[in-house]
């Protein structure tokens, strides 16, 4: 989750250099090459059932494809700090989806956490989201925020579906198959964007950042997350998503030099309070 937050923040630099669909296509393509050896079924892996295949598709479509599109377009329209505040709603979103799809009860503490997260997001909408005054982006910060909220729901779906997959399929194979689906889904749009893109204009430092983004986003973080889910109860998994908003905001402040105002600080405090409330019960099984 700390790695996810770091590349959410650093993707601000990448979306300034690459069209979003081309960036997503390059990410999935680089990772697919790196994980070719992970596609084969290992000796300890069961054969994929029809349900496994369906879950793998939805894990990729929601957690990889849609999350990447919503996140990349979202950070292009707002700041990394704003992204960190909104991403703090992930534990609350996990609780909501668990209620809807798994029938789990939402306690009063979790409900209070959801309210805090929503209040933080609402307060954030009053800011310019890191855009320059007079720019078209500054006039519509709500659009970037809305896309990031979509990314939150996609990431929460990723958590819920991943717990079911990790019980039957190895973490390495899940990582490779989910990434492969992402590559298939984005290829038509990515290839079209590549036809008119000047690759020679991209600085070497950005290519290095793209390599880090591809390996971290599609390979390392998925493998770490799926491996962890085998040993951590689903209700406790939301605790660790707190590292995502913290690291995303830290990158925005320390690396990108984004300004932080009183509204940002208050919104982030509300978001962290929401995380603490929504995940406190999840700490007990550990």
Image (cartoon, rainbow, N blue to C red):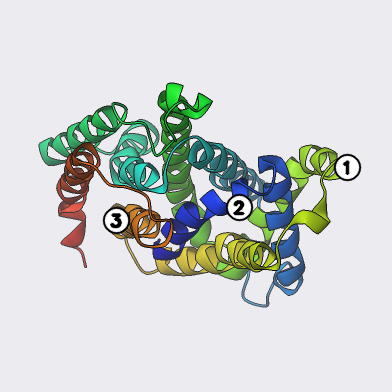
Disc 1 designates what residue? 195
Q: Is residue 23 above or below residue 102?
A: below
Q: Tell me the number on the disc at residue 242.
A: 3
Q: Name which of mark 2 and mark 1 comes first in the sequence.
A: 2
Q: Position of residue 157 (x, y in %)?
A: 46, 42
- In the depicted view, which residue is nearer to us: 88 or 249? 249
Of the 4 image quadrants, the one containing the C terminus is bottom left
**Which of the labelled discs sits on residue 114, or is there none?**
none
Q: Is residue 128 visible?
A: yes
Query: Mark 2 highlights which residue?
Result: 14
Bin the neighbour count of mark 2 within 10 Å (Cα to Cα): few under 14, some 14-19, many 20 and up: many
Mark 1 residue element: helix
* Residue ID at (54%, 46%): 63
Q: CA distance from mark 3 to mark 1?
A: 39 Å
Q: Is residue 232 left or right of residue 267?
A: right
Say left or right for 74 vs 82. right
Estimate how packed mark 1 is, as few (under 14), some (14 to 19) or many (20 or more) residues with alpha carbons within 10 Å.
Answer: few
Proximity of marks 3 and 2: CB atoms separated by less than 8 Å: no
Residue 140 showing in the rendered view: no
Question: Is residue 47 or residue 181 the one in the foreground?
Answer: 181
Which marked residue is nearer to the observer: mark 3 or mark 1? 1
Q: Is 126 situated above or below 228?
A: above
Q: Is 146 left or right of 203, judged from the image as shown?
A: left
Q: Mark 1 and mark 3 in contact (Cβ < 8 Å)?
A: no
Q: Give the percent coordinates (x, y) of residue 159.
A: 43, 50
At 34% from the left and 38% from the top, the residue drawn is 93
Question: Quadrant location of the N terminus?
Answer: bottom left
């Amino acid at each position: 989750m700390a790695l996810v937050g770091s590349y959410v923040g650093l993707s601000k630099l990448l979306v300034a250099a690459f069209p979003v669909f081309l960036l997503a296509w390059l990410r999935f393509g680089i990772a697919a090459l790196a994980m070719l050896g992970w596609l084969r079924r290992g000796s300890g892996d069961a054969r994929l059932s029809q349900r496994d295949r369906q879950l793998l598709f939805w894990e990729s479509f929601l957690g990889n494809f849609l999350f990447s599109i919503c996140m990349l377009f979202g950070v292009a329209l707002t700041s990394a700090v704003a992204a960190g505040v909104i991403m703090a709603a992930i534990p609350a979103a996990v609780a909501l989806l668990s209620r809807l799809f798994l029938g789990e009860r939402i306690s009063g503490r979790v409900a209070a956490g959801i309210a805090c997260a929503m209040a933080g997001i609402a307060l954030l909408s009053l800011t310019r989201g890191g855009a320059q005054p007079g720019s078209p982006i500054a006039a519509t910060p709500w659009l970037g925020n809305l896309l990031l909220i979509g990314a939150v729901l996609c990431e929460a779906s990723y958590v819920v579906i991943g717990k079911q997959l990790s019980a039957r399929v190895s973490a390495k194979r899940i990582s490779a198959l989910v990434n492969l689906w992402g590559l298939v889904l984005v290829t038509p749009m990515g290839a079209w964007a590549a036809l008119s893109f000047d690759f020679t204009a991209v600085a070497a430092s950005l290519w290095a950042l793209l390599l880090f983004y591809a390996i971290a986003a599609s390979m390392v973080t998925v493998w770490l997350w799926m491996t962890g889910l085998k040993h951590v109860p689903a209700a406790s998994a939301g605790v660790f998503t707190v590292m995502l908003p913290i690291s995303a905001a830290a990158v925005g402040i320390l690396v990108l030099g984004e300004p932080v105002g009183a509204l940002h600080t208050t919104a982030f405090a509300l978001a962290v309070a929401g995380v603490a409330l929504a995940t406190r019960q999840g700490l007990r099984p550990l």
